Image: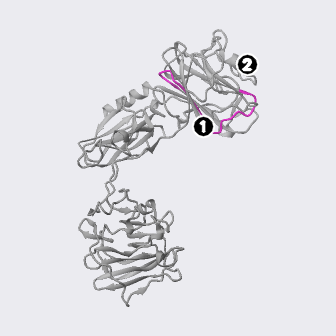
Amino acid sequence: MKELLATLGAMVLGSALATGQCFVPNGGTLQGQGDDGPLLPVTALGFAFPFAGSTWTHLQVSHNGVLFLSRGGASGGTTTGYSDQPSSLVATLRGGPGQPPRIAPFWKDLQNLAANGGGVFVDTAVAGRCTVTWRNTVEWGTQERKTVQCLLFADGTVRCHYDANCRLLGGALLVGLAPGHGAADPGPAELSPLPATTGDTSYQTFTAAARDFDLAGRTVEWRPDGQGGYRVTSTVCSPASHTEFSSGCGGLGRAAFYSTAAPWFAQASFGAGLSLRLASGGYTAVALATAFLPPSAHAVVLPLGDEGELAVPLPVPLPRPGGAVTQVFVGSNGWLGFGPLAGLQPGAFLPNVSGWLAAPAGAFALWHDFDPTAMGGGRVLAETRGNRFVVTWDGVWDYAGAGPAAASTFQFQCDLGTGDLHLAIAGLSLQGGSQYLLGYTPGGPVLDPGPLDLALDLPRSLLPDLPPLTLTVAPNPVLGRTIVYTTAHIPAGAALALQIVSCVPLQPGIDLGPFGAPGCWQAVDLTGATLIPLLRAGSDQYAIAVPNAPHLCGFVVGSQSVAFAPGRNALGVVTSNAVRSVFNLF
């Protein structure tokens, strides 16, 4: 963990923040309320702040959205300085001979009134950081409240936050900083979007007429570049959060099967049907192991409508994986369900793989658009024959079909003693083309096993799916909190499993399919990343105590897990989804 935290610290100090920081929630001590008047009291920063080639230990704040630096005495900054003319604001920012450095988050004629819950606050409680907040401030002569905040850090970074209500209602406004003393004018710099590099004088002016103030809900940061200037970034404020992206790979679908290949239904190579043998671990699909039983005179017609489904009681419980059932759900479109299936989507009448894999209950099916209500067509019958419960589609026509060519005859046999299931096919309509799906599902969602070749892939054991590698993390990465990463579904035979923590999430990432790992993606940059061994098969966790360090605010970390699992694919590598984490104070 120490290695990881050191790596995170190095990542933060060595790179620009990739997302926005947000307001410091504790406003600090009230310095003053009112309008114009003298500058507020000189306040010690608590550290030496490097600016314009020197260091400064104190500040003095104006009601009008600007602060001035000093070394302990009165700053000598202007008490007003605002103007409706951008050129005048720039001249005031530059200052005159002997005037101090100034930082202007929102230089405008402002009022900080008690009646509005307003005021200027200064907070120096956190070592190495000073926070100045103009809370619920309003432009002179208006009532619309806004909050602006400026943070100074011991490394020389200046960070300004603007709440979502920040807009310019009249006149002109300046945002920027300068060393004073008549600093040269480099010209305005666009503060959004960025990043950009500037000298020690950096500003942008806005006018209400142009409606060009675009910093509401954003953060602007000036971070020293080591060359006497700044790297400036402007980003949207983002709270602490985790966001999953990409997807895990390496899962194996084994619980369900399906075949939609045409024209399997016109061939007898698989024995004109299919049987599911019940064993301790589930079913095994084999070639048909019984004969078709023509309906007897005792068979009863099930009152099924087109697109209908009916719960039918069994004479005795039917053994099933997970426990016996006392009824089955017969669907007019060719399924024997072990729970309601009428909600198969999309389109219960149209066989489709996505609907099958998401089926709400277990089922054995020969899914097709049948219509047991068609005039002249057959019906769906049910009866008990010895130890078997049999449901037969007896010459049932396709929907909108007519005549013998549109008729299908098949049946499901449930062995009430062994729990075996049989699908026996006497004949199928050829008018249906490929609009059939033969399959079994334990109930979804299940992984896609790919289509079954009934001529080549039998017998087939139906076992629980092997899910893809997954990575989750909780709680949100608020500074000072411990977060826990959980990697699940680590293959039992994996030679090595790792969690990777990187400062660069990759979206969409690098497709590993061409290297022999279809569906797998590298979703984080490996340069400078930390590798954390995962030592347990199945599931393993790793906890990180996030430092309560202000410079981590807004920092982004990408995480992904990987397992080296021979046999899962040609490359022998499976990857998890990735998680993008944003650190902040809340």
Which quarter of the image is occupied by the N terminus? Answer: top left
Image coordinates for residue 514, horizontal then vertical, percent: 37, 39
Q: In which quarter of the image is residue 429?
A: bottom left
Please, which residue is most extreme toward the bottom here?
A: 297
How was the colour assigned to the protein in this rendering? one colour
Residue 217 - label: 1
The magenta region covers 152-172
Helix, strand or loop at label 1? It is: loop
Neighbour tally class for label 1: few under 14, some 14-19, many 20 plus, Cα within 10 Å: some
Q: Is the magenta stretch mostly helix, strand or loop?
A: loop
Assess whether mark 2 and mark 1 are in contact (beta carbons under 8 angstroms).
no
The residue that appears at 47% across and 68% down in the rendered structure is 432
- Residues 379 and 502: in front is 379
Q: Which residue is drawn at 38% across and 31% down?
A: 8
The reply to whether residue 135 is in sight is no
* Residue 393 seen in the figure: yes
Amino acid at pointer 2: Ser
In the rendering, at what x and y percent does residue 119 appear? 63, 34
| Three-letter amino acid code of the residue under disc 1 | Gly
Q: Nearer the viewer, residue 495 or 480?
A: 495
Does residue 120 appear to the left or right of 270 in the view shown?
A: right
Earlier along the polypeptide chain: callout 1 or callout 2?
Answer: 2
Image location (x, y in percent) of residue 357: 41, 61
309 vs 521: above or below: below
**Residue marked by disc 2:** 88
